[in-house]
Image (tube, rainbow, N blue to C red):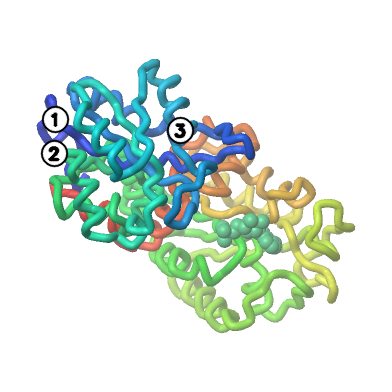
Amino acid sequence: MSKKTVRDIDLKDKKVLVRCDFNVPMDENQNITDNRRIVAALPTIKYLLEQNCKITLCSHLGRPKGEFKKEFSLVPVAKELSKLLNKEIIMAKDVIGEDAVSKANNLKNGEILLLENLRFHREETDNDPEFSKKLSNYGEIFVNDAFGTAHRAHASTEGVTHYLPAVSGFLIEKELKFLDEALQNPERPFMAILGGSKVSDKIGVIESLINKVDAILIGGGMAYTFLKALGYNVGNSLCEDDKINLAMELMEKAKEKGVKFMLPVDNKIAKEFKADAESKIVPSAEIPDGWQGLDIGPETVKLYAEELKNAKTIVWNGPLGVFELEKFAIGTNEIAKVLGDIDAVKIIGGGDSASAVEKAGVAEKMTHISTGGGASLEFLEGKKLPGIEALLDN
Ligand code: AMP
């Protein structure tokens, strides 16, 4: 790893500020519905406890847009963390206010304080230097373990590193290890499955992966811009007309590089974007006017499954259909199951694809499921992540 981790710095008895990604989903009663991001933070926190540190944790949750809102409080996270660690978590009522500062000043070695939601202050996302400086007062050393926000230059990910020596935690180390190994030294054939709604969001990742993979398998809404570029009628399917030329260029580039570029050969189409919409399966060349493609069809699943069976490394980002609606989740679900049965390095790029493998019951069979959808996508695009760039070099 090119950046220093908690292992590379003396942390014994130190006061440490840790940026975690506790941005967990909750129901309307603030019950955490998926605690994976909290669980993923435990190895670093446990290590800091072993080092007898005074630990101040911070995170954002949702988008409270710069003001206190009870539904975005981190109190439920403190409770969950306390349960998982079997240890008291001291909860601050604010971030840089009197309560947090006084609790931090009274913190003893081996104790854990959790600050309130960083995004109760607009200065967090503005990467405000004054706010960063105040955060830095909570530590002698800064540990970033929030992979999910590493692609954002915010006060708690980048700003604070101007005032404190900064190292990564074990989660960021693990994320980088898997993503980097897949990109730098993949066992071949190396294949990427890319889905999601828009081509425009995935241009960067497609361009970057064309230089690295042996095959790209496309699904989801973005498939229709490519199909239209090839002259197919796509009816009312999601299609970015202003990206058709670009879609063509990407396919030509793939051809030049000898990268197999696969598009759906059939689709589940519907007249409306609705859970109970009338639907049918048609070949890609036969999408009628007035209908829209909402999932890949069974022939496509078969074709993709055959291709994927040969892969030794697979990266998957984005659902292959409107997987939130049961009727159009079949393609995504089937491909998740296919991955479950394949013996290869399988990396899931967070977000929707992570939920899909979870739902399909094959999460355990994946090599790595990233905790950061956006961050992993930017990493795959070959972009530098500001929260990681800012850490001390090894
Ligand atoms: P993204 O955020 O770009 O990864 O896109 C994820 C979203 O794409 C999900 O909410 C899916 O419902 C949506 N999606 C996937 N396939 C389609 C499709 N064929 N038509 C419309 N939306 C889709």
Q: Residue furthest left?
A: 10
**Amino acid type, callout 3:** Val
Residue at mark 1 to residue at mark 3: CA–CA distance: 25 Å
Q: Picture coordinates of residue 7 (x, y %)?
A: 17, 33
**Amino acid type, callout 1:** Lys
Question: Which is more foreground, mark 3 or mark 2?
Answer: 3
What is the secondary structure assignment of the residue under circle 1? loop
The dot on residue 140 is 2
- In the picture, measured across the screen, residue 253 lies left or right of residue 146, that is right
Mark with earlier residue (1, 2): 1
Q: Does residue 287 appear in the picture of this structure?
A: yes
- Is residue 387 placed above or below 229 in the rendered structure? above
- In the picture, measured across the screen, residue 205 lies left or right of residue 393, that is right
Q: Picture coordinates of residue 177 (x, y %)?
A: 31, 43
Label 2 Cα neighbours within 10 Å, binned few <14 / some 14-19 / many ≥20: some
Residue at (21%, 39%) from the top-left corner? 138
Question: Which is more foreground, mark 1 or mark 3?
Answer: 3
Residue at mark 1 to residue at mark 2: CA–CA distance: 7 Å
Residue at (41%, 52%) from the top-left corner? 376
Residue at mark 3 to residue at mark 2: CA–CA distance: 25 Å
What is the secondary structure assignment of the residue under circle 2? loop
In the image shown, does 371 or 249 lie closer to the viewer? 371
What is the secondary structure assignment of the residue under circle 3? helix
Which residue was labeled with disc 3? 75
Report the image quarter containing ligand 1. bottom right
In the image shown, does 330 or 282 lie closer to the viewer? 330
Circles 1, 2 touching at the beta carbon (< 8 Å): yes
Q: Residue furthest top?
A: 86
The dot on residue 14 is 1
